[in-house]
Structures are given as C-alpha cells and as structure tokens.
Image (tube, grey):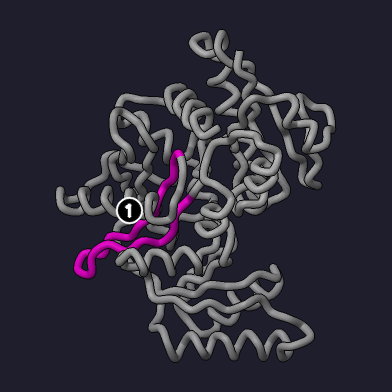
Amino acid sequence: MIKVGVIRGGSSDEYEVSLASGSQVLFHLREDRMKDKYTPIDIFIDRDGVWHVNGIPITLDKVAEKVDIIINALHGNYGEDGQVQKHLEQLGVPYTGSGSLASTLAYNKSLAKNEFIKLGIKTPKHIVFPAYKEYFDESIDIYAKKKAKEVWEKISPPWIVKPINGGSSMGIHVCKTFESLVNAFLDGVNQKVSVLVEEFIIGKEATVGVVDNFRGKKVYTFPPIEIRIPKTSTFFNKDIKYNGMSQEICPGNFTEEEKKELENLASLVHTGLNLNHYSRSDFIVHPKKGIYILEVNTLPGLTDESLMPKAFEAVGSGMSEFVEHIIKLASDKK
C-alpha cells in the first residue's frame, strides 16, 4: 500500500478553497477502485501554519516519516509560491505539481509575464508597483494618487488592478475612472502587497488545462473552456467562481483556429516555464487583437466548482483517473 499524504488548508486567503480541493482528492483516494492500492493520509495545515496528520499536531520533519508521496492541494501563499515545495525537496519527499523554482516564478504575476513575453505570447500591457513603504513613500493618499496618475498617463482605461501574487481572483479591482484607480491603490496599501496594473482586455474568457504524459502525449492539452459571467459582473471573481454563478462551457465556443492556438499556447507556457505534472492557463480572446494570456496556475482548484474537473469530464476522464495519474508522475520523479 502506498501512503499518500494530501496537504490542504494553509495560512493563505485561499484556505477554504484548499480544504475543498483536498477533500475531493481524499474522497477519490477512498473509492473502491483505489482503496486497495493507497492509504490516504489527511495532512491539514491550520491558519496559523501548524501541521496536523489525521488531526494530531506534528512537526514537518515527522510528516515525511508517515508518507511515501504527497499530493499538494494547497492554494495561494506557501502552497503555490515554492515555499512548501522547497521544504518537501529538502526532506526528500516526492510531491505532485511543479518544483520550487518553477512555482515561485509562475506565482509572481510580473515574473510570469516576463516569461510569456520571452516566449512570444501576447499579454496585456502592464505596470508593476512595489508594496507601499511607510518610511520611504509619501502619505498613503498622496502615494495612491501619484501611482494612479502614472497609470493614467501610460495605459488607457479601463484597467485591472491585482496583487502581484495570489489566486482565486482575490484582491482584484476593475477600474474605469481615476477615482476608482486611486481606491484600488489604497486597497493595495492596506493589504501591504505589490500591485500589478494592466490594461483590461475585453473578450471571451478562456482557460486551458494540461497534464503531463497523459493518453500517450508528453503534454496532453484539454479542450479550452469558455467562461461566461453574469452581465452584472465585470470579471470572473471569487464569488462567481465558487458559487455557481458562471457558465463554463467545455469545449468552448471558439473557432477551430482559436481552439488550436489556445491549446498550443497552454502547452508552450507549461513547458516554457518548466512546470510539472499539470497546470491551467487563463486567456482572453479579443475579437480583433487575438489571444492574450493573463496568468498560469500551477495548482488549479480541484473542487466541485473548479475548472480542471470539468475539463476531465469533457474528454471522458475524471478526478479518479487524474489523482492516480499524478501519483504516478510524482512517484516517477523520485
């Protein structure tokens, strides 16, 4: 029996999403077709960063003694930014997902954009603003107005303002006026994060998942999913994602040319950023300007409402096959 630890929870804002992703993985590990092969071990990290195995607090080094392999179902800071990966690498524990260096690179939206540009992929025009420093910058109000003015002079509205790190569309503002742009910077100051401001491209939202060494392909690309949001919303935010308020159409309503390009770009991002096992890339398809990449997710959600499981179903697969497949990928990496 292979002892499979499933890490979930964590101290990031995506704690609840991670609990749900990990719960789904544990559920499938306990299915009849898998329970004779694997012993699932629930590894929970609470909001304070304390590790638990089957409900009992434990130190990280002791976790390594209890598992043969780890499925990383964390999201957000610590889980996706290379930190937990680095710890597991030091302990010599095989785990699912990308390595520490690739995770760090992909999680930072500015660094990832630089890589997209090197790969020749269009991405929205953007500016990065380091986190506000009380001892070096002007007052908060002056700082926010000054940075908003800089954006106003360089990028035409509307704009999308987002934390440089993080997922699940948290902390994102869509701004159409100078005043709303100032308020977005004030929110960034309050959150003490570096901020990325980019031009807001209007078009069809698309996301494409890939998995390594699946169905005879080195990088298997799932059909692009088209995301439709309510007319009352301006972007695919957290509430829409996890409360069933959006339509996810798979395969999406794209032309054959768009479909092929989306799949090629997702594969290129996955290999170009040296990602492992699986990833999901998010795009905007503009009717005249073409396809722009927004970001890549190295540990996309695996909840009931998440996009990757919908892609599995579209090709006649499912979470059970996916979970077993990534266990094998991580085992082969030992």
**Which quadrant of the structure image shows residue 25?**
top right
Looking at the image, which residue is at 76% across and 24% down?
54
Q: Is residue 167 magenta?
A: no
- Rendering coords of residue 173 (x, y %): 53, 68
Question: On screen, 159 above or below 45?
Answer: below
Counting from the top left corner in percent of width and height, residue 196 is at 52, 72
Instruction: Say which of 213 and 288 sits in front.
Output: 213
Q: Is residue 9 above or below residue 176?
A: above
Question: In what element is the residue under mark 1?
Answer: helix
Residue visible at 71% across and 31% down?
43
- How packed mark 1 is, by other alpha carbons closer than 10 Å (few <14, some 14-19, many 20 or more), is some
x and y, in percent, of residue 228 in the image = 35, 50
Q: Is residue 259 left or right of residue 278?
A: left
Give the residue pinned by disc 1: 268
Which residue reaches farthest left? 256
Magenta region, residue range: 277-297
Q: Quadrant of residue 123?
A: bottom left
